[in-house]
Image (cartoon, rainbow, N blue to C red):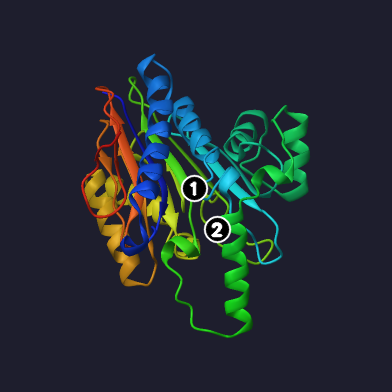
Amino acid sequence: MYSLAIHGGAGTIRRETMTPAIEAGFHAGLRTALLAGHAVLARGGSAMDAVTAAVMALEDDPQFNAGRGAVYTSAGTHEMDAAVMDGRDRAAGAVAGILGPLHPVLAARAVMEHSEHVLLIGPGALAFCRANGVEFTNAAHFHTERRWQALQAELARRTAAAADTRSDADRHGTVGAVACDAAGNLAAATSTGGMTGKLPGRVGDSPVIGAGTWADNATCAISATGHGEFFIRHAVAHEIASRMRFLGEGVAEAAEKVVAELGALGGSGGLIAVDAAGNVALPFNCDGMYRGRIGADGRALTAIYREAPAAHG
């Protein structure tokens, strides 16, 4: 039984500032990504193709911090990270600190499929992508006024040495997808613009295999979102897989325990996970997480805050 789960980032707009129109926009964006991935699975496609399609849809949506909606570094530039992993053989590809590829997730997939490496960064990654036919676009494509103003507000706060009162949504964001296809194969994909005002050269957990991205048919597929430094230090994605492998925990139990432990240590965020039976887990320890799931029935269920995912639109 195939299934797909997605996230558009942990940490959401506060309820008191969320309008019906904004909320509807997020649900619509999540639904579009779910249906893109489901279309692949419904025709017998692979989990890898499904997560790629879902993440590409999220990268095209400026509401989310990836691709077109990526946040700015402290230098006013874009540096994007992405990763993919195939649960059949643990093949993986990732890129970090790039600007140019229209879909960073396709850059990561090119690394997996056309190189002997797992992670490429910066100018070398861009040269590799050009040589392997990854579609590029200009820098203006990734500019959004909302993200630019968020950077200006953060730089002003730092100049004034004011207390950091930003919401989790203002601090970070990521998009991702995990899937189990009809053959029981798993895959994961994650893409991000990073943290608003991050130092140029900073790399978070999204392209780090075992931290923000993981897939292994023997256990689970995971895409994480949140304060990346914590996810790296605690090898969150691999920790969940290890709990399943060595403690015999189910995907929901393992994922929920690790996310709760991370929160107790100060790590804000969440993740999506799926096992080879198609069971999905969507835990988070912050105010909300843009998320959704879809199965063979084709019903796209989405949620933002603590409510259970439901059909919208």
- Residue type, numbered disc 2: Gly
Instruction: Tell which residue pokes out farthest to the bottom in this image.
Output: 161
With 188 as the anchor, is 42 left or right in this view? left
Q: How many numbered tags mark residues here?
A: 2
- Place of residue 31 in the rendered image (x, y in percent of width and height, measured from the top left): 37, 34
Q: Which mark is residue 37?
A: none
* Foreground residue among 66 and 4: 66
Q: Residue at x 36, y 50 (%)?
A: 271
Q: Position of residue 222 (x, y in %)?
A: 39, 44
Residue tagged by mark 1?
A: 64
In three-dimensional space, the C-alpha distance between marks 1 and 2, rounded to whole angstroms, equals: 16 Å
Indicate which disc residue 204 carries: 2
Looking at numbered disc 1 in the image, what kind of residue is underneath it? Phe
Q: Is residue 124 above or below residue 1?
A: below
* Quadrant of the image occupied by residue 41: top left
Label 2 sits on a secondary structure element that is loop
- Depicted 157 relative to depicted 125: above or below: below
